[in-house]
Each structure stands twice: as structure tokens, then as C-alpha cells.
Image: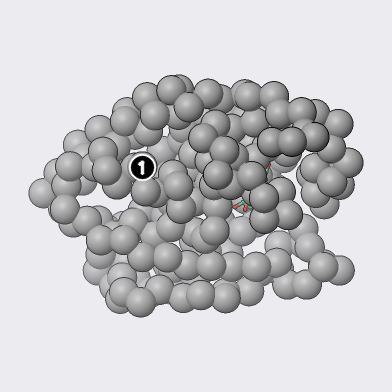
Amino acid sequence: MKGKDFKIIIPRRELQKKIKELGKRISEDYSGKEPILIGILKGSFIFLADLIRVIKVPHEVDFMAVASYGQEIEGSGVVKLIKDLNINIEGKDVIIIEDIVDTGLTLNFIKKNLLLRNPRSLEIAALLDRKERRKVQMHLKYVGFTVPNEFVVGYGLDLAERYRNLPYIAKIEGSKLAQRRFEL
Ligand code: IMP
């Protein structure tokens, strides 16, 4: 992108290879079942699109969107639901598909919300895991890559709604906005 210095930290080929592995594991683990994959908008949509094309078991897809509860308390873990599921997940095997787990606050909210609906099982697949900043511990059954303590973009992940289209995961060198966003 013009005027920006992107440093690729996970190239396209590595992403594709890892997603194939995750798809294979999910297909084995859910053999004979029909899981519901829930993509958390917006960041997960590219990961989800590639993942379902390497999953061999029949499955359904739905989406949820959440937002932090206003600027002033961003990072506080107060999250609101802005788009709910269309599918009833009671008694179903559910896999949450997330782009990146950072503090874990967002996923903690989503997990609690979904558990109230009594799914048969609930697991998490995250493309990226930034363990160092975790505030809420949780088990991530499927993880693509552990990423360092820096803001990343691409492959669905944005900075102020941009760069989701990059086919790799990158950090932006010298971006004050990325730095600010990361410190929240
Ligand atoms: P958490 O609640 O702190 O775990 O944050 C999770 C959400 O914050 C992710 O689903 C992303 O939407 C966003 N996020 C966290 N880190 C990054 C990043 O490095 N780049 C882009 N989005 C991020």
C-alpha cells in the first residue's frame, strides 16, 4: 500500500498451509457430526472463508458481531452484541471462529453468551493468538499462529477499517495509529 511500510510476518503460503492443517483436524474431530461455525465479524471473514473450503464434514455457518461499549471504556471488556445469530445452537456442536485473541475479553463475552443457549459443545478456532496480553484465560482448541506483542493487519484484520484485503499478516512499521490502537 502506498506510503506505508508493511513488514510481512506471516506470508500467504504459510497461512494457507496452516489453515489446511486446521481444516484437517476439525474434519477428523467432528467426523460424524455437523458443527456450526460462528464467524465473529468482521475480522474473521477471510479466515472462515478459507477454512470452510478445507473442512470435509457437513457444517453450517453463521455470524455474530460485537463492539466495545463506547470509546471511553474501550478495553474494559464491556462488549455489546450488534448482530446476533440466525441459527438456534441448542444441542449443537459449535466452533467460534475468531481472527485474533488478544486480551480475551471479547471472546469471553461471546463464549458466555453462547453457553447460555446450551450448545452440546463449544470450541474456539483462532487464526492468531497474542498470549502475552491475555487478561482472561481460556482454552483455544485450534490456533493458527502465536503473534508477538505488536498490532497486525491483513487477512481480515484491519486498522481503522483498512488493510483487511492484504493476503498476508503484516505489521505496519512506524504507524502511530497502530501504536495507539495497540495500547488501548
Ligand atoms: P480482545 O478482546 O482483546 O481479545 O480483542 C479481540 C479483537 O480485537 C479481535 O477480534 C480484533 O477484532 C481486535 N484486535 C486485537 N488485536 C488486533 C490486531 O493486532 N489487529 C487488528 N485487530 C485486532
Q: Position of residue 47 (x, y in %)?
A: 44, 44
**Residue beneath label 1, please?**
50
Q: Is residue 120 visible?
A: no
Q: Position of residue 125 (x, y in %)?
A: 42, 44
Residue at 51% over, 75% down? 83
Answer above or below: position of 99 versus 112.
above
Q: Quadrant of residue 56?
A: top left
Tell me if 166 is positioned left or right of 5 in this view: left
Answer above or below: position of 136 versus 150.
below
Q: Is residue 52 visible?
A: yes
Quadrant in the picture for the N terminus: top right
Q: Quadrant of residue 67?
A: bottom right
Tell me the kind of residue under disc 1.
Answer: Asp
Q: Residues within 10 Å of mark 1 (few under 14, many from 20)?
A: some
Q: Position of residue 121 (x, y in %)?
A: 31, 57
Residue at 58% over, 47% down? 164
- The local secondary structure at tag 1 comes to helix
In front of the other: 121 or 161 = 161
| Colour scheme | one colour
Residue at 77% over, 34% down? 4
Tell me if 35 is positioned left or right of 67 in this view: left
Q: Position of residue 128 (x, y in %)?
A: 55, 37
Residue at the farthest left position: 32
Residue at 64% over, 36% down? 130
